[in-house]
Image (cartoon, rainbow, N blue to C red):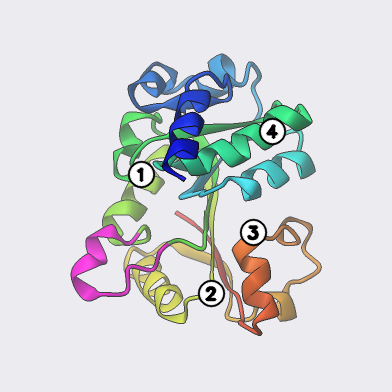
Amino acid sequence: MAKRKLIRFKEIGEFDNVIELEAGLPFKGKWASDFFKNNNPIVLELACGKGEYSVNLAKKFPDKNFLGIDYKGNRLWVGAKMAINEGIKNVGFLRIQIQNVLNYFAQNEIDEIWLTFPDPQAQSPLERKRLSNSDFLKKYKTITKPEGIMHLKTDNDGFYAYTLQKVNELNFNIIIQTNNLYRDFYKDEILTIKTHYETLYLKQGKRINYVKFNF
């Protein structure tokens, strides 16, 4: 396992669809023009893990640019390799800590953000690590266009309730919210994409919480 991780870390350093750490700084404000070589909207997936959600979004929406963000390079390798093998050019990956997102994106640069099944960090002292706490949400607002939107999908009821609380405290505008996504909005094309873990959760009979809002 350790040997495979080392191999993957070496390989992602050679992938042209992966940007690591400080190498992403020069793209700030220029991700569409300099990285994707177009003027299409940019969509982020935060804590993207293996990146299969970003890759599948990119396949479904070729007129948008998708950028998966995570710090674990051995996981990013999976999505990056998939995109390379399938020749998908409108998806890339950025290996950074999400708390540093303001260093990598300019104000109003992003059109849309996805947060899919993040670690709920359920223990109270870990609230600072929750990716939907007030500090994180304010950062996302800074880099997102005024008309931009954010999505959250989670199987964790506590994290969902916590996120709704923070969204309301910051007076953001909720567009859709449901504690049973595939009962209420299963026909929405963009919501037909499922992560590996989401598929497992559904087989276990778990309900998927979803909220869509803008800043």
- Whether residues under marks 2 and 1 lie with C-beta atoms below 8 angstroms apart, the answer is no
CA gap between label 1 and label 4 equals 22 Å
Q: Residues within 10 Å of mark 2 (few under 14, many from 20)?
A: many
- Whether residues under marks 1 and 4 lie with C-beta atoms below 8 angstroms apart, the answer is no
Front-most of 135 and 20? Answer: 20
Nearer to us of marks 1 and 4 is: 4
**Horizontal and vertical percent position of residue 147:** 54, 46
Q: Residue at x 47, y 22 (%)?
A: 13
Q: Considering the numbered disc 3 on the image, is that residue within a helix, a strand or a loop?
A: loop
CA gap between label 2 and label 1 equals 21 Å
CA gap between label 2 and label 3 equals 12 Å
2 over 41 or under it: above or below? below
Which of pointers 1 and 4 lies earlier in the amino acid sequence? 4
For mark 4, what is the residue? 83
Report the magenta residues as a range. Answer: 119-130
- Tell me if residue 98 is in the magenta stretch: no
Give the side of residue 207 with respect to residue 5, left or right: right
Q: How crowded is mark 4: few (under 14 residues within 10 Å), some or many (20 or more)?
A: many
CA gap between label 3 and label 4 equals 16 Å
For mark 2, what is the residue? 155
8 over 205 or under it: above or below? above
**Horizontal and vertical percent position of residue 91:** 64, 33
Label annotation for residue 195: 3
Name the kind of residue labelled 3 in the image.
Answer: Thr
